[in-house]
Image (spheres, rainbow, N blue to C red):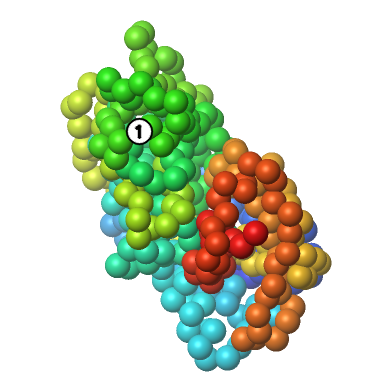
Amino acid sequence: MLTMIFAILIGAVILLIVLDPAKIKTIVIKVLQLYKKGCQLLIKLRGHTVTTLAEERVITGQSWDEFCDTLKAAGSTIMTPGTPKDPFTQAEGYRYLSRIARAGLENFVECSDANAPRLTSIVDGFRAAPCKMGADNPDNLYQNASIDGRNFYKITGTRGSVHYLEFSTKSGQYGQAGGLQTVASLNADDLKYKSVAHKSNSDISVDAEFSIVIGPSRPRDCANYIATDPTIPNGKGMFMIRQTFMDRSKEVPASISISLLDGNARPSKLTCEHLDEGLKSASTLVAAAPMMFAKWASEFKAHSNQLPLFNQERSNSVGGAWGVQHTTARSSGPYRKTLCIRGLPPIEMLRYMHPAPRIQSVGGLNPCHLQP
C-alpha cells in the first residue's frame, strides 16, 4: 500500500515540474516526510520495533520490492512533457538513471559504515564506470565518506598539485530530506603541513604530507581541524572532498584516506535495518535527484542565453562549496551551433587566463581555457 502511495506521489510531483517548477523542492520534501510518517505509523500499529520490522521487510522481500518499485516510478522523469523523445536522448536518460542507481547503492549500501569509513565518488565522470548527477563540475574530482558526527576521524594525505582542494563536513547525506548543509570547511591554502613552511600553494611539493582531525570538538594540539554536527539524527553526516583541476593532464590529485582517530576500524555487522535503510536511500536518490535537476533545467528557460548568478543559499543547501559561485544558462540556439560567451571577469580571475582557449567538456568551461 505504501509503495503504491509513494509511486502516485512521485507521479504527482513529476507533473508539478511542468505545471509549477517553483514548488518542486518543497513538494519533494513533503512527499518524503509523508512517506516516512506513513512508515512510522505502520510500525506503531503493528507493534514492531524498527529492527524487527526491517527483518520482516527483508525476509518477505518487501524491502527489495519497494526498492524496485521506486526505481520504476523514477523512470517517469524521463517521459515528462518537454523532455526530448528521440531514441538516443531517451536512451541517455535511462542510462543516467541507471548510473545514479549504481552510485546510490555504492554510497548507501557498500560504503555507508561510519565505523569503518571509506572514500567513494558518488559523482565522477572520469572513472571507468562514470556517473554524472547534475550541475557537477567536469573539472572536479568529488569524494565523500559517511561519518558519524559524534565520532572523531583522522584524514591523512599528500597535497598533490591540483589547483583547488577543499574539505568539508555536511549535516545530512545524499538521498535524504533536509539537504546537505555545510557544517565547516577547510581550504588547502589554510592547511598546516608536516615540516613545511610555505606562503602559497606554489611553495608546496606534490608529496607534502598533512593530517586533519574531524569531530564534534577540537582536540588539544590539533594543527588542522574541521567540526562536525553531533546533534543530527543518529549522527549521520558526510565528509566531502572537492578537487578542481586546471589541466588534468598535468596536475596530480591529492591522495587522501580516512580512518577513525584511534586507528581501529570497527566494521559494523550487516543488519536487516542497515540494508533496508540503504535500499530506501538509494532508490530515493534515483527518484529525487532527477526531479530536482529537471526543475532547475525548467527554470533556466526564463533566462535563455544569459548567465545570471545561481542562488548561493540554494547551492549551499545541496552540498555546494561555500566559496564557489555559479552562473547557469540555457542555450536557445539550434543544435551544432557555436555559443559565444563574452564577459568581464573579476581581477583575481585574470591569473587563470590562458592564450589557447578550448572546451574541456560539454557543460563546463575551465577558466584556464578562456581567452582574454
Q: Nearer the viewer, residue 239 or 64?
A: 239
User: Which residue is tagged 1?
Assistant: 204
Q: Nearer the viewer, residue 314 or 350?
A: 350
**Residue 14 spot, x, y in % from top left:** 66, 69
Instruction: Give the structural element (helix, strand or loop) at label 1.
Output: loop
**Residue 240 spot, x, y in % from top left:** 43, 41
Q: Is residue 67 above or below residue 160?
A: below
Q: Amino acid at mark 1?
A: Ile
> Which residue extends farthest bottom?
87
Q: Quadrant of residue 274?
A: top left
Q: Quadrant of residue 261?
A: top left
**Residue 249 spot, x, y in % from top left:** 35, 60
Q: Nearer the viewer, residue 157 or 284?
A: 157
Residue under the image location 36 percent in, 8 percent down: 220
Image quarter of the C terminus: bottom right
Q: Nearer the viewer, residue 230 or 193?
A: 193
Q: Is residue 24 left or right of residue 74?
A: right
Residue under the image location 20 percent in, 26 percent down: 263
**Residue 250 spot, x, y in % from top left:** 35, 56
Residue under the image location 34 percent in, 9 percent down: 221
Q: Quadrant of residue 289?
A: bottom right
> Which residue extends farthest top?
220
